Amino acid sequence: MTRPEDSLASALLTPEAVRERSQELHRLGLDDRLQAWEVRPDAMAATADLVAAVVRTNYPDLRVPFHARWRHFAVGGRDRWAVLRATLPADAAERARVAFDLAVLSVLLDAGAGMGWRYREAGSGQDFSKSEGLAIASLAMFAAGGFARDGRTPRADAPRLAEMTVEEVARGFQAGADNPLVGLEGRAALLRRLGRTLAATGLDRPGSLFDILAAQAAGGTLPARVVLITLLRHLGPIWPGREVLEGVNLGDCWSHPGIRRADATTGLIPFHKLSQWLAYSLIEPLEEAGLRVTGIDALTGLPEYRNGGLFLDMGVIRPRDPGVFAAEHAPGDILIVEWRALTVALLDAIAPMVRARLGLAAEAFPLARVLEGGTWWAGRRLARERRADGGPPLRVVSDGTVF
């Protein structure tokens, strides 16, 4: 009998599948065999120079935290999560559950907001946009009990999530005709599917995932890949149905003819961007609860438009058709699938180059620190320098569940 973990579908719900298949498309690029892109490795040295310089600017002492949602809660020098955390119960497990509640919600709501949306923080009067704005808006809504059944407690309850409306999300995120939030309907639908999925599996809140992960720890340690695989298996049904294999919704998984296998996974390439972003973001609450997360470099770089924009803007990759910059593209277009795969592979390639420039070993500076200290911020810096609105180099039609 085939065990679930040995099925073809489960093989695609791993970080190894993301990395392996992205590297396959990268090799095609090096052989000039991609449909939409040319790859220019000679531009990698200058890109690594830039990323290393950005790391030194952002973190002069080179003490870079992991790439995680918690960084966005502290934008502007005020750690909003620390303020809320100080009000939580002393029990370490319950504090971890609350952190999981928040991280799951905030990450799932973190798909690209569009260039026109802003959030004004009540306490400071400051305006925030993009990922930081989405983070602060979700935290404020969470702290006010917007996701709790009682409407007061900072937690998330499955029954409440299952009934979230577009109007409620719009109100919490100050979205409207004069402040449009891209993918608003998709975000609300994602929360509803999250609530229904949790309830269907007997979980009363996203924070219950902490208990599931803690139960898998051996000797107080938990591999990062186990964190991701657990998320993909338990939360898989929340994603819009795209690719389905053996009755399993594969989520952020797409088609490309360059991926060839002798089985039903041929042509399929997973990325699991939001799930990996969530896995990175759960490391800190797990460790604060006394567990040690190991093998963090098993997770891949995130194939989103800041990291991807870095390599495009630096000329490491170039579109065969310059007209792509004037058009909008769907996430499943060959151009976007190849862009994302190249991003994953190039992040792996640039990490050791950045470490060498900083004089740091891989153990001290895993990919999670390379992402946080440099590549994501370098991508944003280039976007601000090269485009008036600071937007990505390519326009992708978003339903609020991918980028």
Image (cartoon, helix red, strand yellow):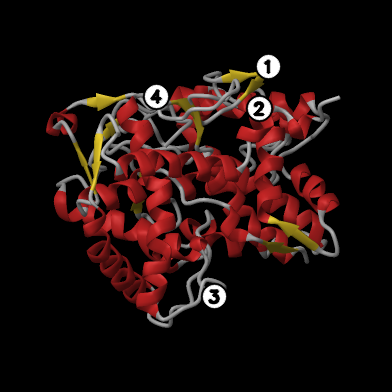
Indicate the quadrant where residue 2 lies: top right
Secondary structure beneath dot 1 equals loop
Which mark lies nearer to you, 2 or 4?
Answer: 2
Dot 3 corresponds to which residue? 364
Dot 1 corresponds to which residue? 247
Amino acid carrying label 1: it is Gly
Expressed as whole percent of the image width and height from the top left, the position of residue 154 reads: 67, 47
Placement of 185 over or under 50, stated as above or below: above
Mark 4 to mark 3: distance in Å? 36 Å
Label 4 or label 1, whichever comes before in sequence order = 1
Q: At x 42% / y 63%, what residue is drawn?
A: 351
Mark 2 to mark 3: distance in Å? 34 Å
Amino acid carrying label 2: it is Ala
Label 1 or label 2, whichever comes before in sequence order = 2
Secondary structure beneath dot 4 equals loop
Question: Is residue 161 something one can see in this rendering?
Answer: no
Question: Is residue 222 something one can see in this rendering?
Answer: yes
Label 1 or label 3, whichever comes before in sequence order = 1
Dot 4 corresponds to which residue? 332
Horizontal side of residue 248 vs 337, given as left or right:
right
Q: At x 16% / y 47%, what residue is drawn?
A: 387
